[in-house]
Every structure is written in C-alpha cells, then in structure tokens.
Image (tube, coloured by chain):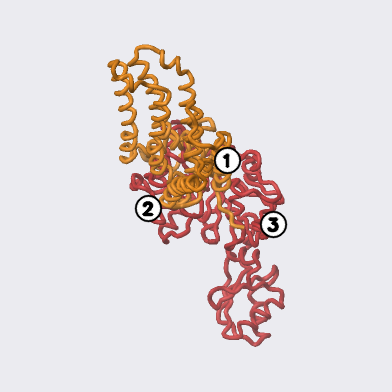
Amino acid sequence: MAETDTPPVPVAAGDVVTLQSVSVAYGKNYALRDVTAGFKAGAVGLLGPNGAGKSTMIKSLLGFIVPTAGQLRVLGMDVATSPLEIRARIGYMPENDGHIPGMTAVAFVGYCGELAGLPPTDAIQRAHEVLYYVGLGEARYRTVETYSTGMKQRIKLAQALVHDPDLLFLDEPTNGMDPKGREEMLELIRDLGHNKGMNLILCSHLLPDVEYCCDHVVVMDKGRIAADGPITQLKGPAGRVFEVRAKSGHDRLVAACRAAGFECHETDEDVMRVFVPEGFGAQDLFKLATREGLQLRHLRPSLPTLEDVFARAVGEE
Amino acid sequence: MPIHDQGYRHFGGTREARGRGWLVIATAGLKSALAKRPVVFLLLVAWIPFAYQAIKFYLTTTFGQLQVLATTAQTFREFLEGQDTFIFFLTIYIGTGLIANDRRANALQIYLSKPLTRLEYVAGKATILAAFLLGVTWLPAVLLLAVQAMFAGNLAFIKANAFLFPAITVYAFVQVVLATSTMLALSSVSKSSRFVGIMYAGVVFFTDAIFGTLKFLMNSSFASLVSPTQSMAQIGDVIFRVPPRHDTPTALSLLVVAGIIGLCALVLERRIRGVEVVA
C-alpha cells in the first residue's frame, strides 16, 4: 500500500461546501430557511445553539435529507446528482453512537474502509494505523460494545478517517467525553485540520471546541446563518471589550450603557462584557457610571472571544 | 525521527470500483454467521435429508427389487417441501438481526455515509440469508439430480424429466426470495431481533392457523390465499407438475406471493434511511 506524508492537493481554491438558498422542512417546521453559505477549505466550525439546524445541514450535505429547496455542493459536486461520488471522498463522524454490532474495533474500521472502497488488505492496514492515531491501538481487538463513551467517540473518528477522506464532517465530536478525553479529541481534530491538511467541518454548540480547532466559523441560529467568516476577523480588534462590575445598580448600568450605544452582554457571573465603539475607552465607562451615580468595582480590558461573536450573532443579551 | 511514525498518513493506493459494497456486506455477514456453532449445526442437520435420499438412490439403482422406491419428479418435490422446516429455523436464526441489530446500534448512518446505495445495503443483507437458504434447498436438490445420474450410470432420468432442473431452480429461488424479503422487512421495523423472530413465527403460524380454520368452515381450501406458506405450496405443485393441493387458482397464489414481496420492498424502501425524520 502506498502511503504518503504529504497533504493532498487542496480541492479548490474556493469553498469546499456551498449551500445556495437551501431550505429543509420537517412537516411545517423549517430546520433550514433559505440558507446560502460557503465553507472554506481548512478547519471550519459550524456553531449554533441546540436546534439551530447544524445537524440538519450536515445530514443534508450527506444526502440523508432531501432539501425542500436549494442546491448543495460538496467538493464541487452536486449532492442531488453525485451523492456516491461525494460520500467516497468524505468522512462522517455522527453525533450519536454508531457501530456494527459484534465486531472488534479493528474489524469494524477495516470493514468501513472496505465499504468506502479500499481493497481489503489496505483497509485492514489502515484500520490498525488510524486506531493507533486516535489512541485506541491497545484496545483494537476488543468489541466496540465493550467500549466506554469516550472510546466510542474515538472509534467513530477512526471509521470516518480510515479511507483518508478529503473532507470530514464531525458532528459534536466531544459529546459525553470526560475533560481529559475531550482535550485529546480536540488535539486530534486540531492536528488533522492544521498539520495533516484535512478539510473539516466541526459541528458543535461548544464555543471553546470550535475556537481551539478552527480558523473559520459559521454561526447558525433558528435555521439561518447568523454570522460567518474567519474567527479572528469576527472577534474584531483587541482593546474594545471591557469586563465591568458595579457595586450595585447592575441593571441601571446595563440600561445606561445601551442608551449610550454600547453593546452589553451579561455573563454567568455578575460581570458584564461591554463593547465600546471605536474612539471610546475605559474613561467613557467611568464617566457613564459617575453620571448614573454608580460605583464600579471592576473594570478590566479584555480580549474579544468567540463567545462574544456568538452572543452578538444570535442576539443573546 | 521515529523509526515508525504512528501518526496519521494519507492513503496513496488505488481504490476499488464502486458497486461492490453489497459484496463486502455479504462476505462479512456470511463469515460472521458461519462462526456461530448453532448455524453450522443447523446446516449439517439440514443436509441429513440429502444423505438419506442419496442412500435411497443408491439402493434403488443397485437393487432391482426396490423399484417401489424408485426416483420420480415427486421425490424432488417432497424433498424440497421437507426442507421447509430448515428454511424456517435458518431464516429466524440468521435473518432476525440482519437489519434490526444495525438499527439498534445506529449502524445505518455509518453504512449510508459510505459510497453505498440503500439498494446495495439491502442486497448485501439479503445475500447473507439467501445464500444459506439456497444452500439447504437449491444446492442439495441439484446435487441430488447429479447423484441420481451418477448412481444410475446414465442420464435417462434427467432426460425424461428435463423440467426438473428449471423447476428446482425456479421453486427454490421464489421460496428463498419470499422468505428473505419477509424477514428483511420485519427486521427493518424493529430494533429487537427477538421481537422480529416472534413476528416472523407469528406470521407463519397465524396465517396457517387462519387457513386451517377457514378450510374447515368453508369446506374448501380456497382460503390458502391467506397463508404465504400454503400459497407457496400451491405454486410448488404446479412448478413440479403434480396435482395442485388447493382449490385456489395458481395465478392468485402467485399474485399473493408477488404482493408480499412487493409489500416487503415498500417497507424496506421506507425503513432503510440514514436518518429517521419525525415530522
């Protein structure tokens, strides 16, 4: 079997996945509404709250769900007319558990390789390799049913990788994993996207996962695209976000900030994040508090995060 | 630099042509089934009637005074009918989990995310069961024909009954297609293979019981239409050129069998999906 350490030639200079006015409806409920989007080559995060339409989009791209309107293209091919050609070149790691009952890990991954078109000998050899890569080398002769949740996540990644796809769809890959396992899974995904030249779409509702692994992000909300672009660009320049906490009158401070045209997002703690427009700074926040008769107990410049992008995109307050 | 890099490497080899996914599924399924002792035991038991018939052929061709046991076309009809029991047990033991287990383990989304059509998936699963069923019906029946010619030392019987080979082939294939499609359809509607087995046995016994009751009440065997087993028996009689056992027109029996196979295909078309959509 010929193997190479060099990444594959990029599929196209443009987008690896495009959606043109795509709508998907379950009965009367729309999961995707007139979505037009493009996913760049490299690691792209598909972000959104539960029910935003992320999994529906992935399943439509796989051809599992036929859209009610619009056109989907993957690696330059139309999903409606070339589903098998597309599936031969992609890997899919589903959100929920999935395996072939009664098989050992190596037999399962090898079997998936054969189904994806690898010759039997190559499939079994690659099965061993990818199982080592995902950290299941020592457990590869155990049946998948005996695996823990974290191991099942890893084997799903292995079966998606065995045929060396040009594009990986990862649907909530860290679901149910303990912190250490999650960290290792993210490390694998980051390695694939950044060092192995693999195009991947990471579908998640966990912002840190996407921020760690991806360069681009597409934010979805209620079946629509709420924001998309490079993460660094979406986060905006540093120095315009402040963490603020008032001694009392928190609500008054929020109201005053908003009245002054500053964007405010509350966090889980009593600290809020205030976005000041260009030309404004910390002094303006002090002036505002003084005018309202409020005492600021905490004011610290902060770096914009993906959480800010997400909050802005989906309109959370 | 490490001697052996266990990191991810890209594949640079050649890939197989598309369209052989069903063969991959069938091969894996056959290997997996043959690794189970009860399956091997059932297969061995299912070949005992073949051995019995072969010995009978030897005795009748060797000892002239046993001509009362001489081979006729009816012998093959009876042999195949006798294999019905093994078809029933093999279908239940091998067939129940074919799709139900995949549904329980969410394997359909894995299968259908590969370059594999739903038809290829069903064909692969059907091949597993059909291969075993043909192995206890068509294969021993055809071998019996050969054995008869071998012991007789001539082809006189085969020439005199030229319809036998096509009859064995058509009957065995229709019977296997009916059993396979029914079992696959039932297997696709549940995640529990045990429940599927109960359903299959229920369909076979319940329809036969209804037929028995109606036959008694109507004093006619026209009601064989309600039973797939009896419809198949009626078709078998016509194929083997023996007098039909029921009053039912054979065309209607054929229509019942075709209807069941069509219904099963419809069920499979609706149930084999990469994702379950509840609107």
Q: Which residue is drawn at 69% across and 51% down?
A: A68
Q: Which chain carries label 3?
A: A
Nearest to the observer: residue B227 or residue B198:
B227
| x and y percentages locating residue B213 in the rendered image | 47, 48
Split into 4 quadrants, where in the image is the C terminus of chain A?
Answer: bottom right
Q: What element carries label 2?
A: loop
- The tag earlier along the polypeptide, 2 or 3, is 3
Disc 3 crowd rating (10 Å Cα; few below 14, some 14-19, many 20+) is many
Does the image show residue A125? no
Is residue B63 visible to the viewer in this orientation of the structure? yes
Residue B63 drawn at (x, y percent): 27, 16
The numbered mark 1 sits on a residue in which chain? B
Chain coloured orange here: B
- Secondary structure at numbered mark 3: strand
Q: Is residue B97 above or below residue A246?
A: above
- Looking at the rendered structure, the kind of residue marked 2 is Tyr
Separation (CA) of disc 2 from disc 3: 39 Å
The amino acid marked with disc number 1 is Gly
Which residue has dot 2 on it?
A147
Q: Which image quarter: residue A52?
A: bottom right
The answer to whether marks 1 and 2 mark residues whose Cβ atoms lie closer than 8 Å is no
Q: Image quadrant of residue B256?
A: top right
Could you tell me which chain the residue with mark 2 belongs to? Answer: A
Per the model, the C-alpha gap separating discs 1 and 3 is: 41 Å
Q: Name the residue under label 3.
A: A33
Residue beneath label 1, please?
B259
Q: Colour of chain A?
A: red
Question: Is disc 1 placed on a helix, strand or loop?
Answer: helix
- Does residue B122 lie above or below A294 as drawn? above
Do the residues indicated by labels 1 and 3 lie within the same chain of the protein?
Answer: no
Image quadrant containing the N terminus of chain A: top left
Q: Are marks 1 and 3 in contact (CB under 8 Å)?
A: no
